[in-house]
Every structure is written in C-alpha cells, then in structure tokens.
Amino acid sequence: MDIEPKNNGVKRVADSLNSVKVKLICTFAHFALQPLNKFTIIFQTHASRIGAIKEDTLLLLRGYLADFIPPEIIIATTDILTIDYRNKVNQLPRNSLVVGNDTLDLISEFEDEIHGTLIGDRFYDSVRLFYETVVSKMLA
C-alpha cells in the first residue's frame, strides 16, 4: 500500500491554505462580511427593529458603497440607490479600495509577492467584484 500520493495531496492542500492568495482572500472576507453579520444578528435578536429595516439597510448599503465609491459621489447623490456603482469611472482606484487593516498588514508583509503580480491584480479584482455583488444583491 503506497501512502505517498495521499501525503502529496495533503501537502498540496496545506500549501494552498498557506498561500498568500488564500490568506488575502480569507482576511478580506473576514473584514468585509462583518457588517452583514452584524446586520443579520440585529434582526434575529431585535424583532422590534423590523420597522427600521429600510433605514438600517440604507446605512449598510451606504457603508458598502463607501468601501469602493469615492465619497464625493456618495455625498453629491440625493438618492444612493441611483449611484452607477458598476461604472469603473465611479469607483475608487484599486489602492484606495477599503480592505481592512488586517488585510493591509498582510499586503505590506507580502508586498513583493502581491504588488505588480497576478496575485495582486486578481485580489483587487475580487475585492471590487465582491463590493459590486453585495450592492447588487442589496438593490435587487
């Protein structure tokens, strides 16, 4: 019985989980999902807040928009539901996207492996897509 292939598979999985790419994605996800988790917990534990769901949803939406849309666009808009958030012209440049302090620390720590590489490009594309998708689902 040869167990070497299983060990190689385990090693590949372990290597993947320790990759900078996976660390970036997991660290960002931990940061980016916190507002949604908080929002969900509030409505699961405070039935009396049901009447405030629209206001709370708009605050959550505004928070997510602020993570990838320049503040001047948000401030200048009378109705945040009308912001053309998918238009890249209306979005922050990649180095200004909000990714959380822990993610920024990780980016600093692995700067050579991230900046100007496919890992960095794909990560920032994923961040942008995450924010676009969250806003899209909230507006649906």
Image (tube, rainbow, N blue to C red):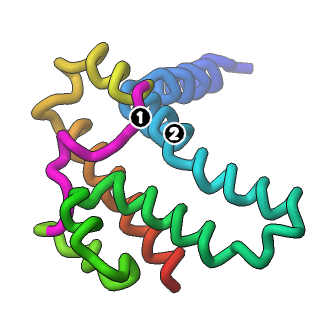
Is tag 1's residue or tag 2's residue first in the polypeptide sequence? 2
Location of residue 46 (image quadrant): bottom right
- The local crowd at label 2, few if under 14, some if 14 to 19, many if 20 or more residues have their Cα within 10 Å, is some
- Residue found 28% across the figure and 67% down from its top: 74
Q: Where's residue 95, x and y in %?
A: 18, 40
Amino acid at circle 1: Gly
The quadrant of the picture occupied by the N terminus is top right
Mark 1: which secondary structure? loop
Q: Where's residue 10, x and y in %?
A: 61, 24
Bounds of the magenta segment: 90-101
Say which residue label 1 marks. 100
Mark 2: which secondary structure? helix
Decide whether residue 104 is among the magenta residues.
no
Decide whether residue 97 is among the magenta residues.
yes
Left or right of 90? Residue 8 is right
Left or right of 8? Residue 102 is left
Say which residue label 2 marks. 31
Q: Is there CB contact under 8 Å for labels 1 and 2?
A: yes
- Residue found 40% across the figure and 27% down from its top: 101
Total labels drawn: 2
